[in-house]
Amino acid sequence: MPDFEALVRAHGDWLAFLATILQREGIVSNDELARALSEFASLTVIDRPEEGRILAFWAAYLQDTSVALRDIPSVH
């Protein structure tokens, strides 16, 4: 079984992959999804701190991915 940190990173990678597809299809931008997830994390951390920190990590990861992908042309 993978360790906890590897599992969190793998889920973050999957989420970034999905967010890229959603943006490409014009459903939601990576930035908007990252902002929404960040807001959700800030509410979650109140009652479930560990889960909130994981969600905040994913939101930051999505934001970083969004910045990194801005200058890369989309391939359809």
Image (cartoon, helix red, strand yellow):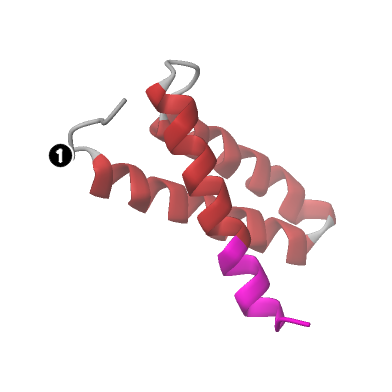
Q: Where is residue 13 in the image (x, y as percent from the top left)?
A: 51, 57
Q: Where's residue 51, x and y in %?
A: 75, 60
Relative image position of residue 58 (x, y in whole percent)? 55, 54
State the extent of the magenta-drawn residues as a range: 1-10
Tag 1 residue: 71
Q: What kind of element bears circle 1?
A: loop
60, 69: nearer the viewer: 69
Q: Is residue 21 placed above or below 69 in the rendered structure?
A: above
At 35% across and 52% down in the image, what residue appears?
64
Would you call the spot at circle 1 few (<14 residues within 10 Å), some (14-19), or many (20 or more)? few
Please count the marks in the image: 1
Residue under the image location 67 percent in, 71 percent down? 7
Q: Main secondary structure of the magenta part?
A: helix
Q: In this view, does 40 lie above or below 13?
A: above
Most distant residue in the front direction? 76
From the viewer's perspective, is 7 left or right of 12? right
Residue 73 in the figure: left or right of residue 19? left
Q: For residue 2: magenta?
A: yes
Measuring from the top left, give residue 34's x and y in whole percent. 48, 39
Q: Which residue lies furthest to the top in this view?
A: 26
